[in-house]
Image (cartoon, grey):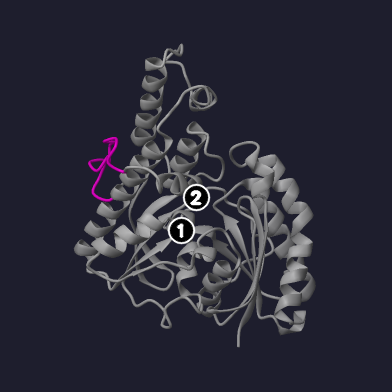
Amino acid sequence: MIDILAIESSCDETAAAIVRDGRHILSNVVASQVELHRRYGGVFPEAASRQHTRDIAPTIRQAMQVAELDWDDLSAIAVVNGPGLAGSLLVGVNAAKALASARGLPLIGVNHMEGHIYANWLACDDGPEMPPPFPLICLIVSGGHTDLVVMHEHLVYERLGQTVDDAAGEAFDKVARLLNLGYPGGPAIQRAATEGNPEAYAFPRALNVGPFDFSFSGLKTAVLRLVQEMRRDQGHEIETHRQSFADASMAATKAELPVADIAASFQAALVDALVTKTVQAVGQFDAAEVLVAGGVAANQLLRERLTEKSPKPVRFPPIRYCTDNAAMIGAAAYYRYLAGYRSGLDLDVIPYLAIV
């Protein structure tokens, strides 16, 4: 048995987990900062790193207690060293290095996005019994990333495309803020969209940016322009060329907007772009399955549309493992451990670490 203590602190969640043999979760503890950052409408980096400093030790301690393991039972310590917020990453990396040094355990640095992919290997009561077969098309959709990747075998990736501007999760957050729906934006947009008409507004899909690339800046701007036009029609003063998303979101409270229809139409456009490019990749590369990873993988419309349109089976992690957690880092670290990857105590954070 290989039991790995994994630590995740790349953004605004302090997490620790112990994963056995890359699939079996012995513990998974997450100290969320959502309420801390809700007042800002997004993650405030300095506040996030300070909160990580407060939460890291008790989170690790709780993960060990829940798993009912001693330090001598562990095979290695894994930690995310990128991509993410530099200050947040440092807290987790420094804690992992200190523990590895003090306990004489191997240290394994893990890419955060690779962790999201490996959430699909976790054994869960509400998930598939068997791990995914290769080759795989992986759609990684989160607050900071939108990538389409071929996974040929464990730890071997080929990037097909990525976002050329905003990530899908970032677009969700900004449009939710514009419509005064709150933070985080993905769940807020999804809730509002349930009461709306997804065909009310013909928002752009930006399908011509590259064979497998994505672009959501134009979609986001189209929503902004619509809100500005509605405000103008209602007699509100506006400076279209100068008004930012923050300005427009504050002004939107004074206007009566068809929020549900806008949210539903925006969500439909974004999901359509993700599904179209992913299905094209499946056909071209003859993948055995499709994996979806990252926080946006929790979106119900994406799950339904991609499952419906894909010619091959589609696998999503259980929703609780779509957002940032340490169990997925433990799963990825297991395969790095087997492959002989080890990090030195000079392991540093790389905020823009790429998966390929």
Q: Position of residue 25 (x, y in %)?
A: 59, 77
Rendered position, 89 above or below 266? below
Residues at marks 2 and 1 touching, judged by CB atoms closer than 8 Å? yes
Left or right of 20, for residue 190: left
Region in magenta: 198-212
Give the amino acid at mark 1. Answer: Ala
What numbered label is drawn on residue 298?
1
Left or right of 353, for residue 280: left
Q: Is label 2 or label 1 in front?
A: 2
Which numbered disc flags the more N-terminal residue, 2 or 1?
2
Q: Position of residue 206 (x, y in %)?
A: 27, 39
Tell me what residue is drawn at x 75 percent, y 70 percent.
62
The quadrant the N terminus occupies is bottom right
**Residue 207 among those drawn in magenta:** yes
Give how far apart the Cα atoms at labels 2 and 1 are. 9 Å
Tell me where residue 293 sits by quadrant. bottom left
| Crowd tier of the residue under label 1, counting other residues whose Cα lies within 10 Å: few below 14, some 14–19, many 20 or above | many
| Crowd tier of the residue under label 2, counting other residues whose Cα lies within 10 Å: few below 14, some 14–19, many 20 or above | many
Rendered position, 251 above or below 191? above
**Residue 343 among those drawn in magenta:** no
Left or right of 338, for residue 275: left
